[in-house]
Image (cartoon, rainbow, N blue to C red):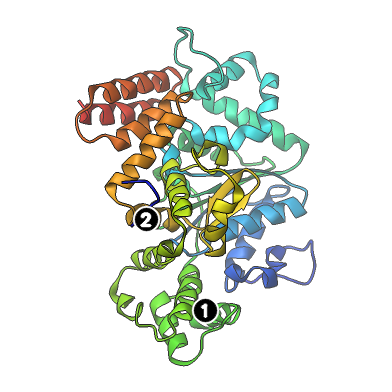
């Protein structure tokens, strides 16, 4: 494909009662059939200013609606006047030490100066806010204690919800910090909701904390979701969608859109034997050929960058380039950020591009990130055609910086990739 130049039910009787997370469901079709999950998450939020479990791990297959549940939890926490800190795992930052912690703590970083000096200095060092200047790497315990102190300071003002989405893509250092904090929340006005894909729950959260599975919708709930679509399917097509989607909310929505484009269902009838994730990727990819080349190029850059900041996407000017992708339901643009509709959009865009197009995207991003040598090195590595000593050395230098900040896992990953290029 040409990428434009790249070769428990909820109580709805009141607005403040127990289990009232489901308020507003009529405005959230993606949450239809999720009353039990909403009730359990409501109890977690209420525990932030009362008693009960402080941590909940939400699991589900791609398209199960985990992000919609996290979004509703955040909205409910805000309604209860709780503070919210949020982090979303990003494939493009998985190898950057403490990238997730940096994203999580940005709203409370002004409180750094209230920390004990050794904690403040260690955390600033770990987040790359201070130059190394030959100082030794900060102790891991000090970094984790600093983050916990900062979180509890924030919660002293009002109860706090920590919301973690796509945890399977968080860097190891950030996962270590979150697990350390999670084990120390008993009696504190803090709740932690962590969402991850089935089979990809980070090991630190796999056994020690309560789990909630967002499983497939039953047929009645799936039918309600179909009826909430702009053009509800009927008859044979409805039955086929219910069978192929197997209770997956995103599949129900996207298959309905697909059949509305192809009422005979010829294009999708053969997809029943494919894994669900592959079918969804195919459905998202089906929209790509209809987009202008400039829009496809912009989508590929976003997919390769793994970032939501428009300012970091080179050569994309004007909001109009995103309009076709927004109309196709692939992205949402809000101010200076662009958000892919679903992680499977990212994989669909990348798979639809040729190797040459993906390589050109990484090279363009590397050129635009001269001021961020760690991310630049990884984009260069993604574009490498074989052994490359210069890129290997850039990765080795990145590893040394990570090591100096206490990001040992990220350093090891960078060294491993450097060895592959040597």
Q: Where is residue 239 in the image (x, y as percent from the top left)?
A: 44, 87
Q: In this view, does 276 lie above or below 95?
A: below
Q: Is residue 407 above or below residue 81?
A: above
Q: Distance between the residues labelled 1 and 2?
A: 24 Å
* Residue at the extreme top: 134
On the question of residue 163 being in view, the answer is no
| Nearer to me, 162 or 232 | 232
Residue under numbered circle 2:
199
* The quarter of the displayed image where residue 407 is located: top left
| Nearer to me, 4 or 9 | 4
Left or right of 232 in this view: 43: right
Residue under numbered circle 1:
222
On the question of residue 150 being in view, the answer is yes
Q: Residues within 10 Å of mark 2 (few under 14, many from 20)?
A: few
| Nearer to me, 16 or 225 | 225
Picture residue at 30% right of the left edge, 78% below the top: 270
Question: SS of the residue at dot 1?
Answer: helix
Question: In this figure, what is the number of numbered marks?
Answer: 2
Q: Where is residue 215 in the image (x, y as percent from the top left)?
A: 47, 68
Q: Where is residue 150 in the image (x, y as percent from the top left)?
A: 65, 29
Q: Where is residue 133 in the image (x, y as percent from the top left)?
A: 48, 8
Please tell me whether mark 1 or mark 2 is closer to you in this view: 1
């Amino acid at each position: 494909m040409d990428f434009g130049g790249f070769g428990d039910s909820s109580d709805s009787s009141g607005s403040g009662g127990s289990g009232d997370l489901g308020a507003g469901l009529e405005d959230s079709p993606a949450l239809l059939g999720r009353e039990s999950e909403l009730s359990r998450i409501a109890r977690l939020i209420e525990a932030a200013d009362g008693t009960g479990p402080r941590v909940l791990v939400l699991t589900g297959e791609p398209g199960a609606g985990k992000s919609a549940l996290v979004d509703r939890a955040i909205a409910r926490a805000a309604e209860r006047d709780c503070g919210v800190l949020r982090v979303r795992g990003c494939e493009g930052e998985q190898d950057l030490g403490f990238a997730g912690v940096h994203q999580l703590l940005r709203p409370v970083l002004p409180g750094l100066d209230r920390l004990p000096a050794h904690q403040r200095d260690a955390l600033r060092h770990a987040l790359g806010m201070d130059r190394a200047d030959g100082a030794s790497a900060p102790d891991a315990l000090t970094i984790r204690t600093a983050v916990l102190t900062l979180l509890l300071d924030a919660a002293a003002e009002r109860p706090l919800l920590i919301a973690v989405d796509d945890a399977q893509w968080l860097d190891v250092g950030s996962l270590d910090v979150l697990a350390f904090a999670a084990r120390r929340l008993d009696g504190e006005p803090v709740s932690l909701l962590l969402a991850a894909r089935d089979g990809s729950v980070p090991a630190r959260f796999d056994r020690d904390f309560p789990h909630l599975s967002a499983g497939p919708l039953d047929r009645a709930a799936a039918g309600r979701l179909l009826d909430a679509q702009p053009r509800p399917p009927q008859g044979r097509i409805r039955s086929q969608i219910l069978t192929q989607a197997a209770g997956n909310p995103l599949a129900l929505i996207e298959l309905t859109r697909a059949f509305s484009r192809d009422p005979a269902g010829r294009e999708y009838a053969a997809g029943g034997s494919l894994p669900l994730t592959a079918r969804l990727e195919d459905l998202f990819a089906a929209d790509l050929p209809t987009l202008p080349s400039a829009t496809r190029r912009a989508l590929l850059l976003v997919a390769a960058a793994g970032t939501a900041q428009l300012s970091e996407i080179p050569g994309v000017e004007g909001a109009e380039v995103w309009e076709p992708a927004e109309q196709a339901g692939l992205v949402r643009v809000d101010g200076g950020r662009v958000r892919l509709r679903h992680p499977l959009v990212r994989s669909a865009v990348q798979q639809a591009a040729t190797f040459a197009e993906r390589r050109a995207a990484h090279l363009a991003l590397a050129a635009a990130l001269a001021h961020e040598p760690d991310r630049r090195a990884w984009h260069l590595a993604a574009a490498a055609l074989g052994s490359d000593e210069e890129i290997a050395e850039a990765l080795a230098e990145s590893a040394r910086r990570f090591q100096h900040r206490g990001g040992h896992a990220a350093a090891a990953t960078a060294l491993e990739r450097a060895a592959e290029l040597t």
